[in-house]
Amino acid sequence: MESNIEGVKSGYLYQDYRVFHIKERSNKLYDYHYHEFNKIIIFLSGDVTYHIEGKSYRLKPWDVLLVNNHDVHKPVIDSNTLYDRIVIWVDNEFLKKYSEKDCDLTTCFKLADKKSFNLIRLDSDLKETLQRIINTLDASFNSSEYGSRLLSQSLFFELLIYLNRIHINNSYIYDQSSLEYDTQIIEITKYIKNNLGNDLSVDTIAKEFYLSKHYLMHKFKSKTGYTLHSYIQNKRLFKSIDLIKEGMPITSAASLCGFQDYSTFLRVFRKTYHCSPREFFKSKEEQ
């Protein structure tokens, strides 16, 4: 099912991180959506295919998905089976706060984005360690016993460190049989991300990939859930926000990310966040 509403932001995180253990048998059809936070999904059981930025992952028990903030994604679920998973929402700024020079806790998300591969599948030995961490974290997070909050946070960091080590050492299984994607669409999304400050008109991209404009727009929407224009505008907006958070002036960030004038940037920003950039970043500082 394609999304009828483009650019749907789903879920709001008012804490540094949240842990959910969700079991359901549902007929719900999810739209393509994105979050302001990073998301870790530990798949336990069910019949689910997860679509992330043009790639489709057919999940097996104890698979882990790393979904970067602003990644466009949705699950497709067989309602005849119980969908059991643990979902962790985590604020990117929180991860940066607790990172060190030689221990960047956001590395696994960065590598997933760089490799354009979001799935972590482990052999039996590594999976046992993951299962121990996850089961203990799940129990602790839902406990009211003495010290459970501090224990949960330490287990949460243990999980992050474990996932980072696996990604850094390429210790996961790259199972091509569980992955489907259109090579051309993946190359187009990479091209867009690498050229946000340049001309990304439909004519330019169609010429770059030797496609007709009509075919390009139809194919892109069918594979990602977004129109090409909307996808580019969102990626430009999210990149500019990252640059502003790093200290770059708002107008400079907007210009560097391909907005031809500030009024266009402001219109896209207000449409997405329902406030001005200054109001948005002021609220972030007060949180």
Image (spheres, rainbow, N blue to C red):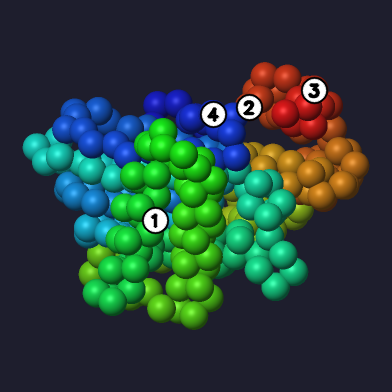
Residue identifier under label 3: 279
- For the residue pair 106 and 215, the one nearer the viewer reads as 106
- Give above or below for 174 relative to 62: below
What residue is shown at x 74% (from left), y 41% (from top)?
241
Q: Quadrant of residue 101?
A: bottom right
What residue is shown at x 67% (from left), y 43% (from top)?
238
* Residue 207 appears in the rendering: no
Mark 1 and mark 3: span between their CA atoms? 33 Å
User: Sequence-wise, which precedes: disc 3 or disc 4?
Assistant: 4
What residue is shown at x 46% (from left), y 59% (from top)?
159
**Measured from the top left, where is residue 177 in percent x and y?**
23, 70
Q: Identify the element where label 3 is drawn.
A: helix
Is disc 3 surrounded by few (<14), some (14 to 19) or many (20+) residues within 10 Å? few
What residue is shown at x 46% (from left), y 39% (from top)?
146
Instruction: Give the amino acid at mark 1.
Output: Leu
Instruction: Give the amino acid at mark 4.
Output: Tyr
**Which quadrant: the C terminus?**
top right
Residue identifier under label 2: 272
Residue identifier under label 4: 12
User: Sequence-wise, which precedes: disc 4 or disc 1?
Assistant: 4
> Which numbered disc, 2 or 1, marks the residue closer to the eye?
1
User: Sequence-wise, which precedes: disc 2 or disc 1?
Assistant: 1
Residue identifier under label 1: 65
* Residue 132 appears in the rendering: yes
**Measured from the top left, where is residue 18 in percent x and y?**
48, 38
- For the residue pair 178 and 171, the one nearer the viewer reads as 171
Q: Identify the element where label 4 is drawn.
A: loop
> Which numbered disc, 3 or 4, marks the residue closer to the eye?
4
User: Sequence-wise, which precedes: disc 1 or disc 3?
Assistant: 1
